[in-house]
Amino acid sequence: MAKRDFYETLGVGREADDGEIKRAFRKLAMQHHPDRNQGDKNAEQKFKEVNEAYDILKDQEKRAAYDRFGHAAFEQAGAGGAGARPGGFDFAGGFADIFDEMFGEFTGARRGQSSTRGGDVRYNLQISLEEAYTGKTTKIRVPSTVLCDACSGTGAEGGSQPVVCPTCQGHGKVRAQQGFFTIERTCPTCHGAGRVIETPCKKCGGSGRLKKEKTLSVNVPAGVEEGTRIRLSGEGEAGVRGGPPGDLYIFLSIRPHRIFKRDGSNLHVEVPIPMVTAAMGGNIEVPTIDGGRARVNVPEGTQAGHQFRLRNKGMSVLRSNAHGDLYLHAMVETPVNLTKKQRELLKEFDKAAHERRSNSPESEGFFARVKELWDDLTD
């Protein structure tokens, strides 16, 4: 009986790309899988055909040979050559490739891969509010791993190179037949690397890496906020056996300021104002985050909680030349430790204030409302 065309078996055209072929195989393999079709010989046969077709078409060289010569290109191998499997088909051949593709990037390795990307490193850096305003360049010391200088990261002693693993022949995995199924697992000799080191480097023990503290220069831009993350590409841990290095992530925290409180790009500060200045008006000087001073006019009759706004005196805005605002919150200060004369003067002022009844409009209005409330309750 003539063998069915492999493209027809998978339901794709001859111009189909690798992705289309993989999708078609996965769909048909799941549909005709023996576990889903217990005792169905027809499904089992279709599963074998789908697997065989994919095994050829997934490989560019085999596909090219099939496109040119058809089934004749593989008749010898199919009759028991090197490509044959005890069960008549290779159950792991198709699925293993798909599993590697789907999960390889999460497990950190693919079949036959001898190098692994280095780990990312986190560093916590605390700065002052003033440094967040101006920005800064600072040096940090980061414990990490670097390539071994004795073996240049290969892990092999004396300039020698790792050799192909004799157990898995460089694939990183070994297969074992268990009845109907072919089981694939990580090679116990090379642990999935595909290569082994016959003479490990004495300095790094064959890992190709050494623990070392690195000194790096970090540029903190003006306007950064709490929790800002700075990434230094390639400054993490060195890769295993020549793999690419990881990245360094610097997480910024800002120390609380003893005067200013930050709200985004704006700053807030509570300013104590003497009672006489608040009552009669005057001028006060307040600090600014850039280290300077600002003169503020306090109008006559300023009350506690009154807010003054100084434009462009707040924090720098990240990646721009703009600045936030500075908000001053008035705190009218009550005099303490009065002298006898001061007490007498305040008593005279209080007497005059009661006669005029217009020096304290807020309190007069409040107690008038309280009196009305009490009168309503007694009616």
Image (spheres, rainbow, N blue to C red):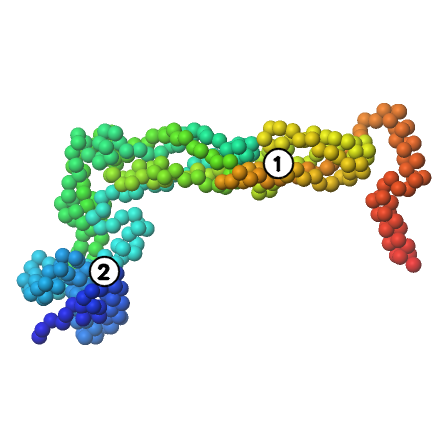
**Percent position of residue 353, x then y:** 90, 37
Q: Quadrant of residue 74?
A: bottom left
Q: Is residue 253 visible?
A: no
Task: Please state which amino acid type lies under the numbered disc 2.
Answer: Asp
Query: Dot 1 lies on which element?
Result: loop
Q: Is residue 82 visible?
A: yes
Q: Which residue lies most toward the front here? A: 321
**Percent position of residue 221, x then y:** 48, 36
Q: Residue at x 26, y 70 (%)?
A: 31
Apparent side of residue 68 relative to residue 187 in the rendered image (left or right): left
The numbered mark at residue 58 is none
Apparent side of residue 145 relative to residue 9 in the rendered image (left or right): right
In this view of the protein, which residue sits in the foreground, 56 or 355? Answer: 355
The numbered mark at residue 313 is 1
Task: Please state which amino acid type lies under the numbered disc 1.
Answer: Lys
Q: Residue at x 83, y 44 (%)?
A: 362
**Percent position of residue 13, x then y:** 20, 68
Quadrant occupied by the N terminus: bottom left
Report crowding for label 1: few under 14, some 14 to 19, many 20 or more residues within 10 A (C-alpha).
Answer: many
Q: Is residue 90 above or below residue 174?
A: below
Q: In the rendered image, which residue does mark 2 sit on?
A: 18
**Percent position of residue 358, x then y:** 88, 42
Q: Quadrant of residue 349?
A: top right
- Could you tell me if the residues under marks 2 and 1 are in contact, i.e. CB atoms within 8 Å? no
Give the number of callouts.
2
Rounded to the nearest whole Å, what is the CA distance between mark 2 and mark 1? Answer: 60 Å
